[in-house]
């Protein structure tokens, strides 16, 4: 919907990312008014897990734009599809996403478009949620609607909660549904469609993750997690612990006449195990990252444009509830 440029802010001498909206959207009076009000609110969100919004303005060609924090890294979409994540890395990303959304939800902001393309991971493995410019503010006097005008529903279908896809009232639990889809995709490298297999069946991950994803993706909002903090807490439990292991088999005493035979077998098995052990560590290493491996990315050089300082306009007055 928009083009993002890597730029350098002359007045503040820092790199920024500029999102330039297309002409047909910039000249849409209704959209521009909502965009300005909501983007102004997003600029008030100050959290390490949320891309900062610096300023909002119009170009000389009358295109709407906003300048954001520049993140040197990669999108979660590229990481999942080109590199892949193991269970620990996927849960670490999910917890960071939940914590950032919890901050936004506490301030009455619903993202409504949580997806891998809108999540960035910088060179220090810090996760940052982007694209809050089209988020929705929760009005205490009225429910938030996914539909901004007849026929227009915001969001990405694969990640949208059922009520959002139907243009019904949405609240913070729509974001919780999206995070459930996100976790599934990080582990399985695909989004869940129709009647889908649980993550553990596809990847062998901890079965407790199945319950978390299933609860987050319930069709009815009342059956989902009621807060993103509760979901983060369950994810943290899995991240901080090991799955339960089946009990070891009990030792069996053997009659003494056959003891030499079994001792010989035990020695042979030990020799084979030792050979496999040394072959594993002496042979070529697996390409699969270790569970403790951090995520590192190198930034890509992009054309640099220069941006003059533009003051952020005051937020337009609130519209009456619809």
Image (cartoon, helix red, strand yellow):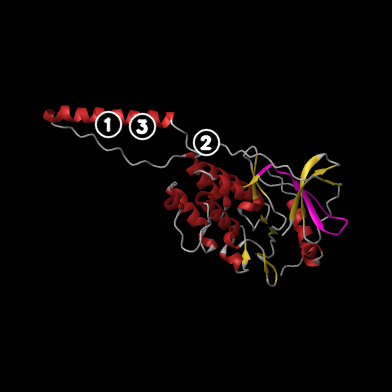
- Which residue carries the number 3 mark? 276
Q: Which residue is depicted at the point 68% across and 47% down?
A: 50
Mark 1 in CB contact with mark 3 (< 8 angstroms):
no
Magenta stretch: give its range.
Answer: 54-73
Q: Which residue is depicted at the point 23% across and 34% down?
A: 251
Percent across and percent down for residue 225 are 53, 55
- Which residue carries the number 1 mark? 269
Q: Nearer the viewer, residue 69 or 1?
A: 1
* Residue 72 magenta-highlighted: yes
- Circle number at residue 292: 2
Left or right: 131, with 256 as reference point: right
Q: Nearer the viewer, residue 321 or 90?
A: 90
Percent across and percent down for residue 318 are 77, 62
Helix, strand or loop at disc 3?
helix
Callout in the foreground (2, 1): 1
Residue 72 appears in the figure: yes
Helix, strand or loop at disc 2?
loop
Q: Which residue is depicted at the point 39% across and 42% down?
A: 244
Q: Which residue is depicted at the point 43% across and 40% down?
A: 242
Query: Mostly what secondary structure, the magenta segment?
Result: strand
Does label 2 or label 1 sit earlier along the sequence? 1
Q: CA distance from mark 2 to mark 1?
A: 32 Å
Left or right: 269, with 165 as reference point: left
Label 3 crowd (10 A; few <14 / some 14-19 / many >=20) = few
Callout in the foreground (3, 2): 3
| In the rendered image, the vertical position of residue 23 relative to residue 256, given as above or below | below
């Amino acid at each position: 919907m928009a083009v993002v440029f890597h730029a350098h802010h002359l007045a503040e001498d820092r790199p920024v990312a500029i999102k330039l909206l297309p002409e047909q959207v910039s000249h849409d009076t209704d959209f521009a008014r909502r965009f300005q009000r909501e983007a102004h609110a997003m600029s008030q969100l100050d959290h390490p897990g949320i891309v900062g919004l610096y300023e909002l303005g119009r170009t000389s060609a009358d295109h709407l734009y906003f300048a954001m924090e520049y993140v040197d890294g990669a999108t979660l979409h590229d990481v999942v599809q080109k590199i892949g994540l193991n269970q620990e890395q996927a849960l670490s990303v999910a917890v960071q996403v939940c914590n950032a959304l919890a901050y936004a939800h506490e301030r009455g902001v619903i993202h409504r478009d949580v997806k891998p393309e809108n999540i960035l991971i910088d060179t220090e493995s810090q996760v940052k949620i982007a694209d809050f410019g089209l988020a929705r503010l929760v009005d205490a006097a009225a429910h938030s609607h996914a539909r901004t005008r007849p026929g227009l529903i915001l969001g990405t279908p694969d990640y949208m909660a059922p009520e959002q896809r139907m243009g019904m009232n949405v609240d913070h639990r729509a974001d919780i549904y999206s995070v459930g889809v996100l976790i599934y995709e990080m582990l399985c490298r695909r989004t869940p469609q129709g009647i889908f297999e649980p993550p553990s069946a596809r990847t062998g991950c901890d079965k407790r993750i199945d319950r978390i994803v299933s609860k987050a993706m319930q069709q009815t909002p009342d059956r989902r997690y009621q807060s993103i903090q509760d979901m983060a807490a369950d994810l943290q439990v899995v991240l901080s612990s090991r799955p339960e292991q089946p009990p070891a088999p009990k030792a069996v005493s053997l009659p003494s006449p056959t003891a030499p035979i079994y001792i010989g077998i035990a020695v042979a098995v030990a020799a084979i195990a030792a050979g496999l052990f040394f072959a594993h560590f002496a042979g070529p290493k697996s390409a699969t990252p270790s569970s403790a491996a951090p995520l590192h990315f190198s930034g890509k050089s992009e054309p640099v444009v220069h941006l003059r300082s533009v003051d952020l306009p005051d937020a337009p007055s609130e519209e009456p509830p619809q």
